[in-house]
């Protein structure tokens, strides 16, 4: 790649392997398609493909006359023909994106990549089957893989073109038209100029303030988001010192450049002040009651002597604050390390999400009257590439922080239905209970998604159920209440998890169609030794009986706990005393062994 092309490609947000996997999946790309494209490269040489492509495309009417544009098109097409050598990585897509941006810079038509991709597909088809009426299955498989790759490429290049146009529009001005604040381009100029005259005595402070919608992101409409951005911008602009510069550096991000500060303490003070002002602005908007605001700060030239380095330091501090659940943080080597580790974890999580590398382990729930296992809790498990397991709450937080919560929900619903089907075919009569997050139960499409998953695996409603916490209900009770009611009406079992630890238990029991309560393990742990814990469990059991609800006690670790809770009237027990969470195959073996039945392999 020449120097000019390298300079162009660095302006791109390069695709990584996880991005490529998502892009290909959107076009229906399957693992076997990758092998098909490689096989095509062995069957058809690049020279043969180039001859057909040139006939169909380069000699077309309307080809550019300007030498620069023609050269750029030729370079793009030359790169495009490397499909014969594609090994399934993201590098080819990134090289083509860089070539396409070069074409745009030289005045090539917006329609060019679509025409080129179409001509490439025609050339591939002609080279494989020619004019034959009969097409063999192998040729059809090769063509299918090529179609999916080429249209994924075309879609990506269209996004690159749109992004390029937006960049050009933003370059026309140094001020954001909506808020009136200096934009990112102006921010970079100001920061560079301030650092050029900074010294040990007079440092440059940088605060990055980030607003995140978190769980509430799905309920914020575009107009509401603009209202939030404008309200925060107006309030912040009135709170800064003379000589400091506040810029809008992202859709929900503001950066304050302090052109002369004596110490990092002033930067930290400014970060806290900006956050408080932003919180005040957000509080005035009812649409934004769940928004979260954090800030990270750094000072130069101590933390970094150049603009990019100082911005990176402030972002590391912001990320460290978010990871530690703190409102504000200042840069430190430890913050940089935390940020780097967290970023690596997020990237690995997104790859795992794209490839659906998550598991559901099953923990039995034992009926005290019969000793039978009537239901299992499906617990989320994710094992990193290096072998360590990530705690389920951390996985959920990663999903919500990265915007992958909806995708994960769909994946887990499908996995739940598949497990329910496998257990039924193995002769194991249990219901599979899946935990739902606060974001999940505010999604009005959840009941339809559940029904779709069950229909795909032909699973009846009584084979599945859902567990949700009181805390999840408190986030947006009216919306959550409607979704939970719809789940109950559809015939799915609904359990209120961690019962007794929330703030409005009675109101939930009165209004929601809940089938069972789960007594939290913190009360179960001391039920044999602590009078207050025993009294709490007794009170919860009385309450449950009044509402005619089944009671499950979780966290049973000893025989004494199991015996006492049975005597007290619990309906089902769950915990390590009976079995630890296990994968589906291990659970079937456990179930068969417990009930003295021969093991039937799954899928038979």
Image (spheres, grey):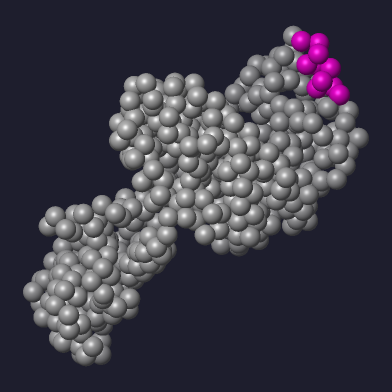
Residue at point 69% right, 57% down?
A: 444
Question: Is residue 507 found left or right of 461 in the rendered image?
Answer: right
Residue 535, magenta (yes or no): yes
View extreme (left): residue? 47
View extreme (front): residue? 242
Q: Quadrant of residue 302?
A: top left
Residue 307, magenta (yes or no): no
Q: Quadrant of residue 105?
A: bottom left
Residue at point 39% right, 63% down?
A: 172
On the image, the x and y values in percent for residue 156 come to 35, 64
The secondary structure that most of the magenta stretch takes on is helix
Q: Nearer the viewer, residue 23 or 190?
A: 190
View extreme (top): residue? 529
Q: Nearer the viewer, residue 369 or 112?
A: 112
Q: Nearer the viewer, residue 475 or 288?
A: 288
| Residue 124 visible | no
On the image, the x and y values in percent for residue 290 come to 67, 43
Q: Nearer the viewer, residue 177 or 403?
A: 177
Figure disc tally: 0
Residue 410 drawn above or below residue 62: above
Q: Quadrant of residue 300?
A: top left
Residue 71 drawn above or below residue 548: below
| Residue 251 visible | yes
Residue at point 73% right, 48% down?
A: 286
Span shown in magenta:
530-539
Residue at point 36% right, 50% down?
A: 18
Q: Quadrant of the N terminus?
A: bottom left
On the image, the x and y values in percent for residue 245 come to 48, 41
Question: Is residue 466 found left or right of 427 in the rendered image?
Answer: right
On the image, the x and y values in percent for residue 212 come to 56, 43
Residue 218 drawn above or below residue 561: below
């Amino acid at each position: 790649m020449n120097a000019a092309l390298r300079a162009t490609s660095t302006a791109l947000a390069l695709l990584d392997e996880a991005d490529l996997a998502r892009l290909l999946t959107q076009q229906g790309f399957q693992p076997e398609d990758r092998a098909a494209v490689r096989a095509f490269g062995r069957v058809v040489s690049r020279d043969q493909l180039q001859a057909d492509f040139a006939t169909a495309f380069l000699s077309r009417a309307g080809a550019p006359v300007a030498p620069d544009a023609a050269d750029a098109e030729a370079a793009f097409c030359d790169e495009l023909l490397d499909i014969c050598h594609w090994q399934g990585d993201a590098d080819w897509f990134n090289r083509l994106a860089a070539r396409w941006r070069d074409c745009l810079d030289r005045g090539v038509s917006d329609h060019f990549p679509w025409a080129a991709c179409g001509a490439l597909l025609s050339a591939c088809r002609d080279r494989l089957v020619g004019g034959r009426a009969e097409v063999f299955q192998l040729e059809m498989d090769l063509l299918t893989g090529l179609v999916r790759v080429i249209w994924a490429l075309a879609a990506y290049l269209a996004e690159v073109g749109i992004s390029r146009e937006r960049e050009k529009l933003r370059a026309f001005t140094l001020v954001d038209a909506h808020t009136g604040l200096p934009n990112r381009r102006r921010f970079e100029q100001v920061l560079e100029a301030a650092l050029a005259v900074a010294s040990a005595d007079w440092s440059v402070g940088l605060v990055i303030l980030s607003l995140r919608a978190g769980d509430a992101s799905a309920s914020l409409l575009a107009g509401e988001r603009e209202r939030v951005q404008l309200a925060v911008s107006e309030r912040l602009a009135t709170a800064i010192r003379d000589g400091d510069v506040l810029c809008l550096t992202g859709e929900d991000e503001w950066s304050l450049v302090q052109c002369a500060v004596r110490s990092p303490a002033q930067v930290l003070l400014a970060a806290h002040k900006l956050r408080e002002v932003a919180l005040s602005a957000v509080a005035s908007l009812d649409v934004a009651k769940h928004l979260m605001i954090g800030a990270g700060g750094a000072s130069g030239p101590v933390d970094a002597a150049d603009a990019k380095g100082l911005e990176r330091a402030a972002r590391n501090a912001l990320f460290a604050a978010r990871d530690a659940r703190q409102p504000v943080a200042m840069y430190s080597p430890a913050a940089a390390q935390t940020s780097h580790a967290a970023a690596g974890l997020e990237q690995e999580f997104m790859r795992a999400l794209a490839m659906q590398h998550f598991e559901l382990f099953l923990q039995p729930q034992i009926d005290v009257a019969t000793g039978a296992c009537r239901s299992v809790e499906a617990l989320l498990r994710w094992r990193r590439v290096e072998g360590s397991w990530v705690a389920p709450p951390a996985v959920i937080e990663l999903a919500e922080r990265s915007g992958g919560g909806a995708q994960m929900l769909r994946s887990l619903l499908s996995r739940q239905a598949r497990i329910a089907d496998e257990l039924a075919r193995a002769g194991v009569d249990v219901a599979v209970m899946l935990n739902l997050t606060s974001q999940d139960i505010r999604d009005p499409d959840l009941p339809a998604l559940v029904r779709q998953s069950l229909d795909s695996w032909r699973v009846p409603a009584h084979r599945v159920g859902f567990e949700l916490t009181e805390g999840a209900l408190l986030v947006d009770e009216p919306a959550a209440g409607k979704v939970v009611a719809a789940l109950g009406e559809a015939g799915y079992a609904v359990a209120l998890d961690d019962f007794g630890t929330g703030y409005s238990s009675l109101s939930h029991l009165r209004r929601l169609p809940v089938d069972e309560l789960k007594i939290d393990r913190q009360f179960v742990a001391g039920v044999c030794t602590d009078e207050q814990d025993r009294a709490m469990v007794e009170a919860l059991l009385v309450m449950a009986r009044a509402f005619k609800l089944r009671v499950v006690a979780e966290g049973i670790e000893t025989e004494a706990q199991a015996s006492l809770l049975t005597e007290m009237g619990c309906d089902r027990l769950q915990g390590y005393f009976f079995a630890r969470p296990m994968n589906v195959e291990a659970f079937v073996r456990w179930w068969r062994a417990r009930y003295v039945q021969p093991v039937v392999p799954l899928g038979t």
